[in-house]
Amino acid sequence: MTRQVEVLPDVAGIVNRALALILERAEAAIAHRGTFSIALSGGSTPKPLYEAIAQQPLPWDKIQVFWGDERYVPPDHPDSNEGMARRAWLDHVPIPAANIHPMDTTPADPTVAADLYEQHLQQVFQLAPGDFPSLDVVLLGIGDDGHTASLFPHTKALTVGDRLITVGNKDGQPRITFTAPLINHARCVIFLVAGANKRPALTQIFAPEGDADTYPARLIQPAGELWWLLDQSASIPVP
């Protein structure tokens, strides 16, 4: 793992830098493997990034879009990560429907939904049982509490080491989420972090020693690249 921390002036700076990183990795992946895979995050910070990606002249038939986590709501719900990404990006480009891989939140039991998405990933990436895919880019953010994706402090999802997908829990509300091992198999992980309210969590996440059960983003130590893009208000001294 190579951790790169960059401080940008504002959210627009984060978006521009993230866009450049994504475009570079997409070009390389398509040149080497004929396809580019990206897992999206929710929240307000990545929305302008998705809007910017939608403006790029990309080979959409070679791009595969996944989600790193999803609230257990329908895609037309205001809180849906899928819905936000479709409105900001995917509905505006000629990407084949088969290249878009949302998490299905229709099953009554979220564990069924997690199983279905795991099976879908195994089929898409032609995985043997127990294997993990290596997505080209996984986009992440953090919460004030240090969570990332839907890996929340002191929840069972943090302990899952043999699955691709599991059920997260936010104040009793289920989420579907990538597991930490799946994220860590990515070729490139990019955190987008804005706001002074993130500083206390970042201090703990970046500390040489700390508690990942309390600050789950500490679990993210990918085999490939690790980028932290911070705006000026979120920046802290990095050990």
Image (cartoon, rainbow, N blue to C red):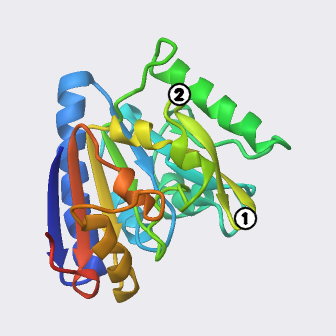
Amino acid, disc 2: Leu
Q: Residue at x 45, y 21 (%)?
A: 125
Residue 153 sits above or below residue 158 on the image: below
Residue 22 visible in the snapshot: yes
Task: From the image, tell me which residue sits under label 2.
Answer: 121
Q: Position of residue 48 (x, y in %)?
A: 39, 71
Element type where label 2 sits in the image: helix
Q: In the image, which is nearer the foreground, mark 2 or mark 1? A: 2
Residue that protrudes farthest toward the top in the picture: 128
Q: Residue at x 66, y 57 (%)?
A: 169
Q: Residue at x 49, y 48 (%)?
A: 68
Task: From the image, tell me which residue sits under label 1.
Answer: 77
Residue 184 sits above or below residue 152 on the image: above
Q: Position of residue 238 (x, y in %)?
A: 15, 72
Q: Quadrant of the C terminus?
A: bottom left
Amino acid, disc 1: His
Q: Is residue 53 left or right of residue 9?
A: right
Q: Position of residue 3 (x, y in %)?
A: 16, 54
User: Quadrant of the rendered structure where residue 38 is?
Assistant: top left
Q: Quadrant of the N terminus?
A: top left
Q: Position of residue 173 (x, y in %)?
A: 74, 61
Residue 57 visible in the snapshot: no
Q: Residue at x 42, y 37 (%)?
A: 181
